[in-house]
Image (cartoon, rainbow, N blue to C red):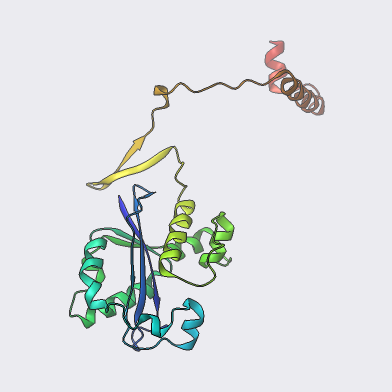
Amino acid sequence: MRQIVLDTETTGLSAENGDRIIEIGCVELLNRKLTGNNLHFYVNPERDSHEDALKVHGISNEFLRDKPKFSAIADELLEYLRDAELIIHNAPFDISFLNKELERLGRPPLNTFIGEVTDSLVMAKEMFPGKRNGLDALCDRLGVDNSGRTLHGALLDAELLADVYINMTRGQDALIMELGALEGEGSVVVQVDFSRFELPVLRANEQEAQAHETVLADIDKACKGKTVWRQLQAA
């Protein structure tokens, strides 16, 4: 299962009103593991960023002057995204900008190239109703280190979101993982057979065993000798 965590930075908030993409960051997950096969572009938007947007991303208009236009990177981006599931925080925002850039080039919308889109903001709102669910808040809540995030950056934010997404969907250390592609209407699930492994047995030492007996005795006393384990011992 190939997933791409995607984020963009833009000149402003409205693609319909002429704002443009200035940065695209993509992080690849294969079977829920980071591969390192990431993609990153700075893009010349052919216009200046709004002052408020500059305060968010800190990418100056001068820095973007010699960067490639979206038309120059479109084919590489679409080939990289082809047939993948996209994971985006507040997906309608980024998708609207990408679709507008494709429309300018006379290309079909993004959904004709990719598999599906998962909005991690929608997921977070369902998991943590009534709480702040911005990327920084989720990093703090889920123990993801975002100390290097002083300004928004598409690649850094995509990397952080990948960690957040993995944490929100069981984590990478789950014993049963969904692998491979869909077959018909059901997904292929691989279950780890632990009978093939020799697992160490860690037994309690004398002090730990005595502490355990003390706790059991206290519970038994509170139950007036009617605890199940005492009845089984008597039988």
| Residue sitting nearer the eye, 151 or 1 | 151
Report the label total. Answer: 0
Q: Residue 216 in the image: x percent, y percent?
A: 75, 24
| Residue sitting nearer the eye, 68 or 137 | 68
Tell me: residue 158, above or below residue 99: above
Figure quadrant of the C terminus: top right
Tell me which corner region of the image, top left, top right, bottom left or bottom right, holds residue 44: bottom left
Q: On the rendered structure, is 215 left or right of 51? A: right
Tell me: residue 61, above or below residue 227: below
- The answer, for residue 31, to whether it is visible in the render is yes
Q: Residue 113 in the image: x percent, y percent?
A: 22, 65
Tell me: residue 220, above or below residue 96: above
Q: Residue 32 in the image: x percent, y percent?
A: 38, 49
| Residue sitting nearer the eye, 78 or 167 | 78
Q: Residue at x 22, y 66 (%)?
A: 76
- The answer, for residue 129, to whether it is visible in the render is no
Q: Residue 140 in the image: x percent, y percent?
A: 58, 60
Q: Going by the picture, which residue comes out furthest to the left?
A: 106
Q: Residue at x 22, y 75 (%)?
A: 72
Q: On the rendered structure, is 178 left or right of 110? A: right
